[in-house]
Image: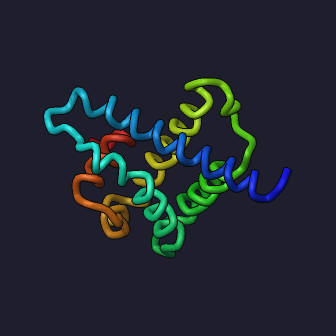
Amino acid sequence: MEWWQVLVSVLGGLLLLWLALIGVLLWISRGQTEKIKLVDALRLGPDVVRLIRRLGADPTVPRGVRIWLVVLLVYLLLPIDLVPDFIPVIGYADDAIIVALVLRFATRHAGADAVERHWPGTPQGLTALRALVGLG
């Protein structure tokens, strides 16, 4: 396999994961009084990647959290998954669930202050992230 095919596959997988996260987020927000806007949901993917990078580089964040964030990034970049991506729906749903679980762990153990300090997006995006990881 050529290098560009690997690159296209990784980018395509990340795009599908991003869309799966948006779907999960919109599904979660259906029961809330304040609905999450589609624009904030679309920005969530890039903002979460920047948040993960910033939290991983912050020496005040506990080492265990930083290790899990690096493991998450490596898992997302590797072509090997728990459930193969060619299986419709659940192939990318497992990635979305893993991202949500690691983000939930990271946000709870890094602390709300660290997450707010490193959050690169809008306040509505931070609210969406909290809804996604179950922090209300």
Q: Residue at x 47, y 54 (%)?
A: 106
Quarter of the image holding residue 37? top left
Work out whether residue 109 can be spotted: no
Work out whether residue 40 can be spotted: yes
Q: Residue at x 69, y 47 (%)?
A: 9
Judging depth in this view, the residue of 25 and 58 nearest the camera is 25
Left/right placement of residue 29 relative to residue 114 reads left
For this orientation, the residue located farthest to the left is: 33
Left/right placement of residue 121 relative to residue 61 reads left
Q: How is the image coloured?
A: rainbow
Is 101 located above or below residue 61 in the figure?
above
Judging depth in this view, the residue of 74 and 57 nearest the camera is 74
Is 47 located above or below residue 76 in the figure?
below
Q: Position of residue 72 (x, y in %)?
A: 60, 52
Q: Position of residue 16 (x, y in %)?
A: 54, 40
Q: Position of residue 3 (x, y in %)?
A: 79, 59
Q: Residue at x 32, y 34 (%)?
A: 26
Q: Position of residue 51 (x, y in %)?
A: 43, 62
Quarter of the image holding residue 90? top right
Q: How many numbered markers are drawn?
A: 0
Is 52 located above or below residue 28 in the figure?
below
Q: Quadrant of the C terminus?
A: top left
Judging depth in this view, the residue of 86 and 59 nearest the camera is 86
For this orientation, the residue located farthest to the bottom is: 59
Judging depth in this view, the residue of 36 and 105 nearest the camera is 36
Q: Residue at x 53, y 58 (%)?
A: 65
